[in-house]
Amino acid sequence: MAEGAGPRDGEPPEDLTAAEAGMWQAFRNGSVYDLSCGDALVDDPHGGHPWGPERTVRARVVCWLLLDGPPALAGRVSSLKLVGVRISGPLDLAGGTVVPYVEMRGCRFERDVLLPEARFTTMRLVDCSIPRLEAARLHTEGDLHLPRCRFLGGIRLTDARIGTDLLLNQAVVHRDRSGRSIAGDGMSVGQDLQAEMLESYGELSLRGATIGVSLSLRGARLVNPRARLALNAPQLTVERSLYLTPAGVGSQARSGMTPARGTRIQRFECEGGIRLDDGRFGDAVDFEGAEFTLTDEQELTLRRVQTPELRFLGQRPARGRVVLSGARVVNLMDRADSWPGPGRLHMGGFTYENLVPRGPFPLALRLRWVDAASAEYTPEPYERLAAVLRESGADEDAREVLLAKQRRRRESLPLAAKLWGYAQDWTVAYGYRPGRAAVWMAVLWAAGSLAFARADHPPLKAGEHPDWNPALFALDLLLPVIDLGQAGFWQMRGGWQWLSAAFILLGWILATTVAAGATRTLRRT
């Protein structure tokens, strides 16, 4: 550009091309500058059809307009609105302050867009082809829109501050040299981050990011199968909800809405691990309909997550692990066929207050869910489930869960303790079915009464014994604490002596198991 040529008089510099001169005038007028030809195949910014000099402007001129452009025409507001334009050279606005409104649609950038530490009011790049967007510490007062754009070398928004919305709907983002598709660590978005039907080929990193309203990945496809993580977002804060759910496809679909019945949908799909550790979500984390493809080493991990509602309603991952250790939720909404099997589910320290199953989830399957929570016995998952069931009024189911806990614990005990556990289980089911003790007592009493009625036992001392009563004698043997005045007055010989000893031993077993069960009941109350 010629020395001395400046924008203050409003006239374009002499060395501008025809395309650039037209852009200059459109900027002053605040109007759309459209260089598309009307042929969809030719105008496709992502296609291979070449765009000649008649559609090309230099990035230097674009930067000049945005940073130090000419004054607007009278009664107009200057702005840069480009359609179907090819921008040659790197668009470098690093550290600059851009006041005019910026909107580019269907444009093709030949080199990277460099916006680190730049400041904008609002910037919209829609359906553009961009090698890479470098925008660390970018600050916008309004929106940053990047829908339907394609980035061959990734996006960097580390520590960016977006005043209102960040839109990445239907964008296609490939990995950079470090393997990341989108680097948004420490980013802050004032309102929504919408990345619906996003295609991410690499790691989507949102470590420590803060979203003022909701984060929507409805219908997105995250692909990073050879690395550990496809979504890496520990310490993510979302004031309302995180959606990893289906999105509607077609003219009837509305962004940010649950697809209406009959609408064709696109599922959220993830090939690679997901890390949401230590996240804080004000309303919910929603996995409804999500599909996970994991390797044996990859995880869907929500360690220490806090949210009022977790909707674990996705498809069961065939491989990999689901980790909920230390997570805290109020409502757990789930399906029986969404959880992985034994050895692939970890719930140590996972707390929830209410269970809201979607579809049939009988207690037998719920016990399998708890059993799958750890390879070795830990009481915590059973006690949490029992407490939740008891709070909901399902006392009988709560007792079944605690009985299952004792049976699982028994398998980890040495032989002697294990045999004692079997005795407690067979007699009174560890005290959780106390009616069994009465049944056993009645059966033994009846059998003893019949057996002892068949023999005549001489007294130990003549004249110092009560009348022989086989029913009271059998009951006196079975009750180890109460003395009914029969045992100890008669001579037991041979097999009768062994039978009496067996009754005494069985009585002590029954009494001990009943006492243990009563103790557990008192502790629970």
Image: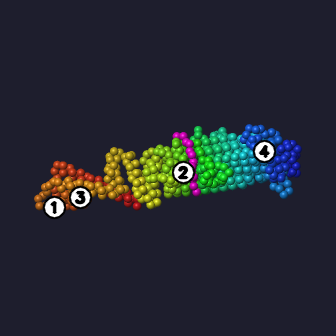
Residue 169 position, x and y percent, is: 67, 49
> Pointer 3: what residue?
475
- What is the distance, in whole Å, between disc 2 and disc 4 at their CAs? 45 Å
- Identify the residue shown where x is 65% and y is 52%: 253
Amino acid type for the residue under numbered disc 3: Leu
- Identify the residue shown where x is 18% and y is 56%: 453
- Locate residue 356 relative to residue 257 in the image: left or right: left
> Pointer 2: what residue?
313
Local SS, label 2? loop
Q: Is residue 516 magenta?
A: no
> In the image, which residues are magenta?
283-296
> Pointer 4: what residue?
38
- What is the distance, in whole Å, between disc 4 and disc 1 at their CAs? 116 Å
Query: Earlier along the polypeptide chain: callout 4 or callout 1?
Result: 4
Amino acid type for the residue under numbered disc 2: Leu
Q: Which circle, 4 or 1, is nearer the viewer?
A: 4
